[in-house]
């Protein structure tokens, strides 16, 4: 239950961080957005694990691959912003192949 509330908290902060990154080409805005994405992913992992545990289904996917890629792309964009804040958000394109990566990583 607390993970759900924290997830909703970070969802309400998301428009502010998106606005900051769209208006200002500085590393701080990218770091704010990246931190928001990481916090959303972490709470998403906690929620999906709790749902998997409560449902009793061991075959259900918990989204760890997708959330892991989200965290990795957020960290990469934060690192790129130290060099060039203009191109930092391109690291988020790494999230597109997430379903294909999940099919390769998770056994059936």
Image: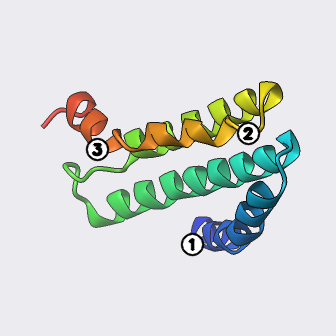
Cα gap from disc 2 to disc 3, whole angstroms: 27 Å
Q: Where residue 99 is drawn, which disc sits there?
A: 3
Q: Quadrant of residue 96?
A: top left
**Picture residue at 22% right of the left edge, 57% below the top:** 57
- Quarter holding the N terminus? bottom right
The answer to whether 66 appears left or right of 86 in the picture is left
Q: Nearer the viewer, mark 2 or mark 1?
A: 2
Disc on the earlier residue, 2 or 1: 1
* 92 relative to 99 in the view: left or right: right
Q: Nearer the viewer, mark 1 or mark 3?
A: 3
Element under disc 3: helix
Q: Is residue 60 above or below residue 102?
A: below
Asked which secondary structure carries label 2, the reply is loop
The location of residue 70, given as percent across then percent down, is 52, 43
- Label 1: which residue? 1
Q: Secondary structure at mark 1?
A: loop
The Cα–Cα distance between marks 1 and 3, rounded to whole angstroms, is: 27 Å
Classify 103 as above or below 60: above
Residue reaching furthest to the top:
83
Q: Which residue is mark 2?
A: 86
Please state the horizontal and vertical placement of residue 16, each as a whole percent of the image.
Answer: 77, 69
Which quadrant would residue 49 be assigned to in this image? bottom left
Task: Judge from the rendering whether residue 48 lies leftward or rightward of residue 78; answer left or right.
Answer: left
| Residue at image location 68% in from the left, 66% down from the top | 14
Q: Separation of disc 2 and disc 1 at Cα?
A: 38 Å
Residue contact between numbered discs 1 and 3, judged by CB atoms under 8 Å: no
Q: Earlier in the sequence, mark 2 or mark 3?
A: 2
Q: Name the spot of residue 28 as percent of width and height, x first.
A: 87, 45
- Locate residue 6 relative to residue 100 in the image: left or right: right
| Mark 3 neighbour class, 10 Å CA radius: few under 14, some 14 to 19, many 20 or more | few
Indicate the quadrant where residue 50 lies. bottom left
Please name the residue shown 48% across and 41% down the image.
93
């Amino acid at each position: 239950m607390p993970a759900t509330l924290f997830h909703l908290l970070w969802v309400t902060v998301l428009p502010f961080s998106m606005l900051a990154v769209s208006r200002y080409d500085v590393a701080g805005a990218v770091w704010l957005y990246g931190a928001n994405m990481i916090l959303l992913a972490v709470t998403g992992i906690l929620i999906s694990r709790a749902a998997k545990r409560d449902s009793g289904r061991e075959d259900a996917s918990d989204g760890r691959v997708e959330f892991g890629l989200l965290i990795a792309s957020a960290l990469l964009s934060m690192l790129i912003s130290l060099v060039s804040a203009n191109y930092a958000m391109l690291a988020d394109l790494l999230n597109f192949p997430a379903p294909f990566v999940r099919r390769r990583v998770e056994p059936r």
